[in-house]
Amino acid sequence: MRNKVVDVREALSVVKDGDVVAISGFNLTTSPEYLILELFEMYKETGHPNNLFIISDTLPAVPDRGLDKVFAELYEDKNQNFIRGVLMPFIGWSPALMKMTLENRIEVYSYAIGTTSYWFREIASGRPGLITKVGLGTFLDPRIDGGASNEIAKEKKTCKVELMEINGEEWLLYTAPTPDVTFIRGTTADTDGNVSMEEEGFYGTVLNMAQAAKAQPNPGKTIVQVKYVARKDTIPTRNVIVPAPLIDYVVVAPDADKYHRVSGSYVTDPRLAGTVKTQKTKELESLLPTPDKIRDRIAAGRVLIETMKLVAQLKKPLFGNLGIGIPVFVSWLAGEFGYSDFLALTVEPGPVGGIALVGQDFGVAISPNAIIPMPDMFTNYEGGIIDFASLGFMEIDPKGNVNPSYSPVRVSGPGGFPVISAGSPRTFFAGGFTAGKGIDIDADNGKLIINSDGNILKFNEEIVKIVFSGPQAVKSGKQILYVTERAVFELTENGLRLKEVAPGVDIEKDIVGKMNFKPEIPEKVETMPEVLFYKDLAPLKEYLDGILKEGGIL
């Protein structure tokens, strides 16, 4: 076999005008940043390649790095013809791409991360696309937006979602153009092109993306960015993640700190790669964000109560997922109370267990118990294999539909939210009751104290974008709770129903009066556990210990 290690420009010369280019990357993890930036330099120098359509399993960028660095320059060039469109499940780490989306400058499509990750596997198998129920009744449904994030995307329909009927049930078929060239990243490649990923934070979708480029009827090229080159046949067999036949060119990144970081804040760290396991300590757990607002702690505590009830019921550690926002504080609280071993938590791109990092490092975990490929992780979500999920929310409507992140001036993309929320058998949405300026909420002696509320209502008759469908969840028999610092709602066939209120709260004034619709209110509304409303965490710990002892866990 020929030596596949080549100069970056030789490898990138296979990218032609009009090509569809697939690029791996969940933030900076598995992002081939050197290939991305060098391809853009070629365009700036020669005007070629141009008119590219880019597809990623997530988004190979964080602010000012990777693809965001490219879009920041493209945004200033009103006549750019480097990129004509993108399919990106999440664009929130690229402010420039979000602005280009809102200004209708290029086609932008946003399928869920799990859907896009699966899609690579499906087209690699020669299938027309991905068939799934995920997205029914949401903005992904073709009867609404079909995954298009702006008007030009709705017009061009380069990526499409079609409604199907199978055995009398509705399904969605997700399609997109297949890649002509794929950029992926590994740690080491031998001269034949076998690729290992021993220093990467996870495997992501790199194998399936390489396979997708090679699938018939129009097989293309795969270029891999690595840190090291090994001699032929010297990478241990079980370490090879992408075998040589799937690789056409190997390019070595010249500067790992500049082009090959394991995550936004780390160049490399064996704890993130899972090659070194450290004991959980207070120092490590301090990496978890801690709530600086008592209202956030209350909501997180209420979710923790629900999860510990489930531990007591199922008599096993819970397999689950915690989203961004208030749900991350659930993990912190569990650590404070010594309950971490009761939660086997996952992160979308593949880590199971460990301490999941946040911000620009989201996606990796310190000392995970396992790391699996991203499509397989999303199988755990979509198949309802996990026991629960807790996710954040920005807006909720009377039917229980949820918008987690969209506003009229922000189009971040759905991320992993649609698959996790649609598949999990139990989802506990958690967030503050209101948002915006002026919030002054306290708690003491078992009561909630609302001094003033935010100026933005979150329970609205209509929401900006439906990303979770309440009616579909009811149809599928899911258990859905909506948890805030002052009230807990449950989802019923009739929509949102008030289940619990905080002690010290007036239902009409503090709940219904701060909503743009009136939920169903039963004759008897339960009271949220008073132990949530103390400055000290000790009453909550005692309450939770009681739940676990009653269930025979402690």
Image (cartoon, rainbow, N blue to C red):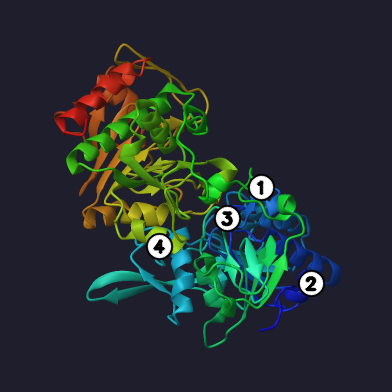
Label 2 SS: helix
Please, what is the three-letter code of the amino acid marked with disc 2? Arg
Cα distance, mark 2 to mark 4? 34 Å
Which of label 2 and label 1 is nearer to you? 1
Viewer-side label of 3, 4: 3
Task: Give the residue pinned by disc 1.
Answer: 267
Mark seen at residue 455: none
Mark sitting on residue 9: 2
- Disc 2 crowd rating (10 Å Cα; few below 14, some 14-19, many 20+) is few
Residue annotated with mark 4: 376
- Residue found 52% across the figure and 82% down from its top: 215
Q: Could you say which quadrant of the image residue 550 lies in?
A: top left
Q: Is residue 514 visible?
A: no
**Foreground residue, 397 or 364?**
364
Give the residue at mark 3.
200
Q: Residue at horizontal 73%, vertical 68%?
A: 82
Q: Is residue 134 above or below residue 179?
A: above
Which of label 1 and label 4 is nearer to you?
A: 1
Dot 3 and dot 2 residues touching (CB under 8 Å)? no
510 or 391: nearer the eye?
Answer: 391
Residue occupying image coordinates x 16% and y 34%:
551
